[in-house]
Amino acid sequence: MAIERTFSMIKPDATRRNLTGAITKMLEEGGLRVVASKRVWMSRREAEGFYAVHKERPFFGELVESMSAGPTVVQVLEGENAISRNRELMGATNPSQAADGTIRKSHALSIGENSVHGSDAPETAAQEIAYWFSETEIVG
Ligand code: RTP
Ligand code: MG
């Protein structure tokens, strides 16, 4: 089993509803450890940079708007197979398709306001962690 790190966000739709603790508890109970965490209110420019891979997608404007509409909690999570484990705990992008017990099934409002983000591969995890954190902010 590989100990990995992944990047996670508790999105503005969730911080607005005071769900930071509830979601973090689901991540911790799912076997992941929070090794870095901070609350940020991202600018439109930061949201555009973070989601640059989606810039041609029809939902890009809406995504940047919702991600800069309030505070986000950015986190680094560590654990066995953390990348895939976090994606399992999150559930499907569209909450109507997410499995019971997942974060999105329990808390997401819609496909756009879906409460959490998690990196999808080792390369994106490394890039996304470096986008928000310096090495000294991560304490394993
Ligand atoms: P994420 O990257 O946020 O962990 O989610 P994901 O892999 O499940 O979804 P992805 O396809 O990477 O899309 C990134 C985020 O864009 C928003 N989205 N909106 N309105 C729409 O049709 C739509 N599709 C995607 C979601 O907030 C999604 O998490
Ligand atoms: Mg994605």
Image (spheres, rainbow, N blue to C red):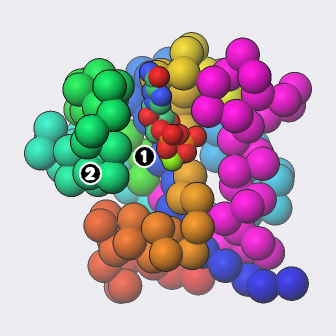
Amino acid under disc 2:
Ala
Q: Between residues 90 and 139, which one lies in front from this camera angle?
A: 90
* Residue in the image at 78% along x and 34% along y: 102
Q: How many marks?
A: 2
Q: Residues within 10 Å of mark 1 (few under 14, many from 20)?
A: some
- In percent of width and height, residue 114 lies at 54, 27
**The C terminus appears in which quarter of the rendering?**
bottom right
Q: Is residue 130 visible?
A: yes
| Residue 54 higher or lower than 99, as above or below | below
Question: Is any part of residue 71 visible from this angle?
Answer: no
Residue 88 in magenta?
yes
**Distance (Cα) linking label 2 and label 1:** 20 Å
Residue 64: percent from the left, percent from the top? Answer: 25, 32
Residue annotated with mark 1: 73
Q: Secondary structure at mark 2?
A: helix
Residue type (three-letter) at the residue carrying disc 1 = Val
Question: Which residue is pictured at 54% across the width and 21% down the height?
Answer: 111
**In the displayed structure, would residue 67 be above or below residue 105?**
below
Based on the picture, tell me whether residue 97 belongs to the magenta stretch.
Answer: yes
Quadrant placement of the N terminus: bottom right
Q: Which residues are magenta?
A: 75-102
**Which residue position holds label 2?**
52
Rendered location of residue 118, percent (x, y): 56, 52
What x and y, as percent, mark residue 88? Answer: 78, 48
